[in-house]
Image (tube, rainbow, N blue to C red):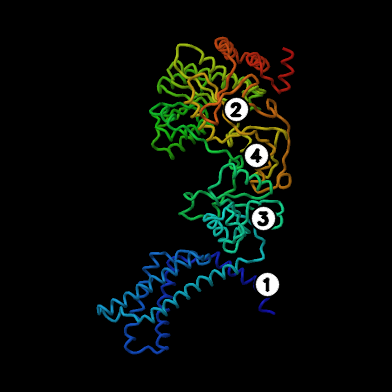
């Protein structure tokens, strides 16, 4: 039949949907419409009560009584805000609010009538109980029906033949219900909630608004394929880090897009919006538990102290600066030679941390005169030494600069720390210094030797601490930002080798442990951080592609380019000759390192620094090899020439 032609129905749906997308009734208009209906319903109640023939004695007062009834309803509407919900998304909560408003208003009108008659307050307040009852029933039905009709029209408009992305919501509690409501609220995003997942067996098998609650077993290939599920949304906060990361890994393995719900305090004006649902990131996937810090120990160590951070504009240095804002430091001196990143850090700190006294000082840690000027002027109590060149392939081609900046900078800052009575010196090292295969790793091992050697010297009270850890997620120039840019540009994602493994830790996590370790030691210790399990870089690339909503080697290709000079297949946190001992912190261990002849080491390093630019690349690398016997370069050019020397 012509009137049920599918194309005509589709056209009606599109017109209705266009209307909903274009317009949303303001709250004042909903309130005005409700009160208009209240008044008209009162008039209808009078007409029904008197069989459409209102007696003459009531004609003079019923209009005024209608206005009084409307005023009473208006007060309760404003109190309970029954007009504030979106009509197209009317829920049981909205209907309940309307019921409360109509019931309270009817009760007040009955009380007005009762006391008006008893106290002879006039005919205006004495409304017949039958009219109040009729009005209560009529106005409730009309307002209920109006909201439900609008919702039904909206559902009709959004139930189009357009393919929707089917999602599962993990969490069938109150937050899950809010997320479901938000997801279903805007058809432009094309989501359809196909089910909830919840660990509570009491909820499993039941329905929420007609949507089934499943158990965790629903995250299976068979279920996902059968129900054509494309996304999983986390709507639960009471979930351990390990369990959440396990669920994320399973969902990613199944090819699902995984979204997370932000904390309530981040909702816009207290309301969750669909665009706020974010894709889970790599930190969620790795699933590392929050760090538990000995706040009292750190606070005692930092209180009223002047802190210097070298390499302050880098990933680690800048995060240490941010961490220090939680403690009452006298001053924080931020030293770096990178002008632009230092400028951006200055603006960030000024904007976010107005009460902290920061000093931004552009300086090169290898410039002894400039650094002495800084030490002389500011007299730091604690130094966090994070300044270093860190890019393996770049340093492999420029060994002179690796020695000048990393080793020379460390030599300068340690010497000045002793001279100016620094209480504690904390150096940031790397897992690449262990059994180094690169110039950068070998230079950092030499930095450790410098710190150990200076710590052995007598005649000073400076406590020298070394912290050693692996890659940090999101640091400047690290593999993760590179992968992210490659994915954003459509690939390929370049991985050096299919069997490369690396440790990973978040930047805040690493810096928190640096602070903890810094006030744990008494001097001369090397602290090794628990980095968890090593991550296969190829798997990391695949996971990042999947988290971005693509299919590896289909949407975005992974390309293996081979190990670069200086790179290893896997990293180590201790050498073959080192052992570790536990500390009071479960994620920090103390390395038992080999004894070194500090005086001889410093003499050889000083000679290397003095003659540095009179040496060739091969000679620099050869001298590094003499100082660090476990250094085995993977740079073919260096290996060939070392045999010839």
User: Mark 1 — residue?
Assistant: 7
User: Mark 2 — residue?
Assistant: 390
The reply to whether residue 339 is in sight is no
Which one is in front in this view, the residue at disc 3 or the one at disc 2? 3
Q: Residues within 10 Å of mark 3 (few under 14, many from 20)?
A: many
Image position of 20 (left or right of 100): right
Badge number at residue 245: none
Q: Could you tell me which secondary element the residue under label 3 belongs to?
A: strand
User: Mark 3 — residue?
Assistant: 229
Q: Earlier in the sequence, mark 2 or mark 1?
A: 1
Choose between 503 and 6: the one closer to the eye: 503
Image quarter in which the N terminus is found: bottom right
Q: Earlier in the sequence, mark 4 or mark 3?
A: 3
Choose between 554 and 405: the one closer to the eye: 554
- Residue at 68% x, 35% y is 536
- Residue at 69% x, 55% y is 223
Choose between 317 and 97: the one closer to the eye: 97
Image position of 588 (left or right of 58): right
Q: Earlier in the sequence, mark 3 or mark 2?
A: 3
Q: Residues within 10 Å of mark 4 (few under 14, many from 20)?
A: many
Residue 157, picture quadrant: bottom right
């Amino acid at each position: 039949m012509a009137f049920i032609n599918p194309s005509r129905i589709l056209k009606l749906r599109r017109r209705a949907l266009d209307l909903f997308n274009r317009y949303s009734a303001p709250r004042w208009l909903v309130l005005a419409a409700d009160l208009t209906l209240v008044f008209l319903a009162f008039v209808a109640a009078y007409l029904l009560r008197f069989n459409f023939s209102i007696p003459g004695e009531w004609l003079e007062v019923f209009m005024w009584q209608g206005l009084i009834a409307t005023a009473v309803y208006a007060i309760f509407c404003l109190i309970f805000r029954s007009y504030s919900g979106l009509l197209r998304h009317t829920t049981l909560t909205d209907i309940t609010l309307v019921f409360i408003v109509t019931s309270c208003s009817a009760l007040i009108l009955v009380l007005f009538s009762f006391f008006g008659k008893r106290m002879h307050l006039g005919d205006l307040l004495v409304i017949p109980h039958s009219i109040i009852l009729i009005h209560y029933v009529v106005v409730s039905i009309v307002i209920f029906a109006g909201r439900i009709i609008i919702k039904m029209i909206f559902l009709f408009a959004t139930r189009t033949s357009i393919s929707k992305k089917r999602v599962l919501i993990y969490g069938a509690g109150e937050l899950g219900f809010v997320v479901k409501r938000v997801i279903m609220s805007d058809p432009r995003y094309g989501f359809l909630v196909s089910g909830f997942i919840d660990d509570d067996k009491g909820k499993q098998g039941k329905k929420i608004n007609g949507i089934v609650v499943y158990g965790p077993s629903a995250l299976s290939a068979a279920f996902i394929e059968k129900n054509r599920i494309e996304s999983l949304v986390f709507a639960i906060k009471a979930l351990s880090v390990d369990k959440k990361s396990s669920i994320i890994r399973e969902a990613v393995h199944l090819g699902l897009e995984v979204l997370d719900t932000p904390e309530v305090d981040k909702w816009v004006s207290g309301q969750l919006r669909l665009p706020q649902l974010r894709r889970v990131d790599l930190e969620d996937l790795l699933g590392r538990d929050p760090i538990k810090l000995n706040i009292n120990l750190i606070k005692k160590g930092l209180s009223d102290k002047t802190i210097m951070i070298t390499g302050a504009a880098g990933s680690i240095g800048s995060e240490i600066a941010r961490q220090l804002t939680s403690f009452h430091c006298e001053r924080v001196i931020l030293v770096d030679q990178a002008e632009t990143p230092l400028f951006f850090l200055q603006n960030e700190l000024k904007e976010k941390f107005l009460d902290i006294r920061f000093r931004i000082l552009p300086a090169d840690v290898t410039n002894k005169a400039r650094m002495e000027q800084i030490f002389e002027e500011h007299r730091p109590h604690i130094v966090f030494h994070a300044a270093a060149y860190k890019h393996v392939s770049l340093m492999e081609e420029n060994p002179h600069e690796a020695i000048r900046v990393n080793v020379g900078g460390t030599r300068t800052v340690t010497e000045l720390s002793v001279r100016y009575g620094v209480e504690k010196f904390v150096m940031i090292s790397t897992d690449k210094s262990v059994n180094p295969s690169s110039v950068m790793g070998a230079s950092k091992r030499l930095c450790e030797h410098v710190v150990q050697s200076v710590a052995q010297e007598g005649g000073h009270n400076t406590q020298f601490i070394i912290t050693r850890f692996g890659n940090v997620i999101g640091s400047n120039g690290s593999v993760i930002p590179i992968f992210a840019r490659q994915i954003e540009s459509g690939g390929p994602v370049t991985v050096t080798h299919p069997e490369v493994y690396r440790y990973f830790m978040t930047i805040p996590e690493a810096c928190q442990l640096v602070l903890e370790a810094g006030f744990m030691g008494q001097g001369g210790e090397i602290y090794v951080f628990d980095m968890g399990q090593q991550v296969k870089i190829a798997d990391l690339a695949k996971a990042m592609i999947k988290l971005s909503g693509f299919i590896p080697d289909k949407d975005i290709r992974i390309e293996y380019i081979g190990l670069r000079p200086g790179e290893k297949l896997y990293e180590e946190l201790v050498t073959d000759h080192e052992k570790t001992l536990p500390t009071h912190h479960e994620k920090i261990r103390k390395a038992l390192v080999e004894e070194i002849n500090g005086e001889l080491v410093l003499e050889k390093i000083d000679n290397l620094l003095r003659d540095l630019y009179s040496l060739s690349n091969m000679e620099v690398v050869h001298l590094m090899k003499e100082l660090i016997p476990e250094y085995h370069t993977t740079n073919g050019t260096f290996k060939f020439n070392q045999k010839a020397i």
